[in-house]
Amino acid sequence: MNMTKQKRKSNFSERGACLRDWPLTGKVLVTVIIVMMSLGLCVAAGQIIVHDIIPTFWGENKNAMSDQDEIEKHSAMRGDLFADTSVEEKSTPFYQTDEFIFALRFTHIHIFGMSAIFILMGIIVLFLDLGLKARIWLIVLPFIGVIIDLASVWLKLFVHQAFFWLHIPGGALFGVVFAIDVILMLWQMWVRPSEQNG
């Protein structure tokens, strides 16, 4: 049984399935995918910096807000870091509240978008010249990060505002793994390609 597994592993790399052995057209396609996804994540990071971080920590009059109307107006204009999201008791059913609809919409958009990125990256990770465990971790960890990131939205809105800070480990997890994937993929395709291609 163990011999069969080893034979299967060696056959997988011997038949040229590793990314470094792909033909030039395949490497170009993977490179373009990496570039476009990197641009998308950079734009998303820029939006977070401009919409959330700068107004929260360096915005004008961030300490000068005294009345509730000003606080609500400022919270609506900026991102989520210190925005007031306390849920007032209303007669509206839970599933019709603005908070629930926002969380549902945010989750719907991000779970498909982020999952699509890491499904595609995961497929490419399958072909990296790495051990089985390393490839499994590179595939699984970004999805854990996405789940933490999305959970922070629900926990912040319906449990406590402090849960917003879960965005940081969630985003860092999938961001770091994405960067590792990109470096390994580009390295294996362009810097250290297979000897049989050279």
Image (cartoon, rainbow, N blue to C red):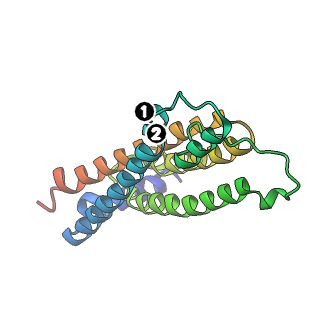
Residue 123 lies left or right of residue 148; in this view the side is: left
Residue at 61% from the left image edge and 63% from the top image edge: 108
Residue at 32% from the left image edge and 62% from the top image edge: 36
Name which quarter of the figure residue 9 lies in: bottom left
Q: Looking at the image, is 36 positioned above or below residue 66?
A: below
Asked if the residue under mark 2 is in contact with the one under mark 1, i.e. CB atoms within 8 Å, the reply is yes
- Amino acid at dot 1: Trp
Residue annotated with mark 2 = 55
Residue 28, given in percent of the width and then of the height, sits at 23, 67
Picture quarter with the C terminus: bottom left
Q: Looking at the image, is 23 positioned above or below residue 85?
A: below
Name which quarter of the figure residue 7 lies in: bottom left
- Amino acid at dot 2: Pro
Q: Residue farthest to the left?
A: 198
Q: Looking at the image, is 27 positioned above or below residue 125?
A: below
Total residue callouts? 2
Residue annotated with mark 1 = 58
Residue 96, given in percent of the width and then of the height, sits at 78, 61
Q: Residue farthest to the bottom?
A: 25
* Element class at badge 2: helix
Q: Residue farthest to the right?
A: 91
Residue 98 lies left or right of residue 106; in this view the side is: right
Residue at 62% from the left image edge and 57% from the top image edge: 107
In this view, the residue in front, 74 or 184, is 74
